[in-house]
Structures are given as C-alpha cells and as structure tokens.
Image (cartoon, rainbow, N blue to C red):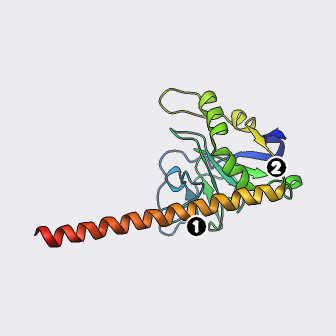
Amino acid sequence: MFTMLYEVADVLSGYPFRGAITAEEQGDVHVVQVRDAKSTGQISINGMVKTTLPGKKNPNWLRSGDVLFIAKGVKHFSALVDNLPSKTVCTPHFFMIRIKPEYQDKVKPEFICWQLNQIPAQRYFSITAEGSLHLIIRRQVLENVPIKLLDINEQKLISNMHNCAIEKQTKLQQLIECDKKEQDAIALNLLN
C-alpha cells in the first residue's frame, strides 16, 4: 500500500544558520552538516562541529529515529539519526523527518530512510528538483514522495539486510585499503 510521506511523518526544517558555522571548542551544540551524512544512510559524528547557536530561535533538537534528508545540493539522500550527542541540530540544507506518534508502531524510520535512498524515490527527486547549479527539493515535494508501507516485520527485515550490507561494504573497504598498504610496502622495500 502506497501513501505520501506527510501522512506518516512530519517534515521539519534544519536550524537557520546565517553564513558559515563557526567552530567553538567550548560550544554546547553539535551540528550535522552535509559532509557528515553518508549515502549509506549513516551520520559520521567524528567530523561534527561544536558551536553556540546564534539567535533566539528554539531549535528542533535531533532525536534518535529522526531521518535527515539532504534537500540542497547535487545529491539528495537521507541518513538516520542514531546515537548522536544530545543538543544536536542540523543545518538548513536538511529536512528532518520525524515519524508521527500515531505511526510509531507501524513505521520504522530506518525503513523510511532506506526507501528514500532507493531508485524509485531518487527518480522522483531528480524529476521534481528545482534549480540549475544547486538543485533544491522543496518541502512539499518531499512531503508528497510516495512511500510503500509494508508490514512492520518486513520493514525490520529490510532494515537489517541493509545494515548487514553496510557492514560488509565497510569490511571489504578495509581489506582493500590493507592490500594497498601491503603493496606499497612491498614496492618501497623492493624498489629502493
């Protein structure tokens, strides 16, 4: 059964930073930027900036289970918020997708995240994106993306399969890097 995203989730804007984000060692807020989101659906916390929020706007703090969608830029994919520090916000390049309370037991955020990164949704975004140099997905376009709702157990199964695939890719990449270092060491030893 297909539905629109807005029926099962709220779409919120990222924090409205004006200009560059200044890194502050003593800052009390972490910021997720586009560079921190991976196309695998993960968020890397290693490079996140700490800062102090400018202005008086009440931020939408990120919660585990939120889905971040990159709305501005060349690529439009989503990443799942999981185990981020408290008091974390995202930049306005993102939309935050938060499952509505009445759908918490029917819709897995990891399944929504996975689905937004798949070919049907990506086709929809490429057709509906606006702009020439920097493509933008408007909120209404994201809210109207068709989402297929499966049984909750099927959603969990697909999410688990996706997580296993990411683990496999990570391990294979580590092996490739190890082989490269080994080859470089052999070359240095033999050719010097």
Q: How far across and how far down the image is residue 118, in percent?
A: 64, 44
Q: Quadrant of residue 2?
A: top right
Eyeballing the image, is 115 above or below 42? above
Farthest residue to the right: give it: 102
User: Which structural element holds mark 2?
Assistant: loop
Q: Nearer the viewer, residue 23 or 7?
A: 7
Residue 18 vs residue 66, the one in the foreground: 66
How crowded is the residue under tag 2: few (<14 C-alpha within 10 Å), some, or many (20+)? some
**Who's the residue at 57% across and 44% down the image?**
93
Disc 1 vs disc 2: which is toward the camera?
A: 2
Give the numbered dot on residue 75: none
Q: Residue 55, percent across and down?
A: 61, 51
Q: Mark 2 is on which residue type?
A: Leu
Q: Which residue is mark 1?
A: 28
Q: Is residue 49 visible?
A: no
Q: Mark 1 to mark 2: distance in Å?
A: 40 Å
Residue at the (49%, 52%) spot, across then down:
35
User: Which residue lies at the image location 81% right of the left edge and 53% below the top edge?
Assistant: 107
Pick the front one: 56 or 101: 101
Q: Could you say where residue 139 lies in the image, as x and y percent from the top left?
A: 69, 37
The quarter of the image holding the C terminus is bottom left
Q: Earlier in the sequence, mark 1 or mark 2?
A: 1
Residue 150 badge: 2
Give the total number of marks visible in the rendering. Answer: 2
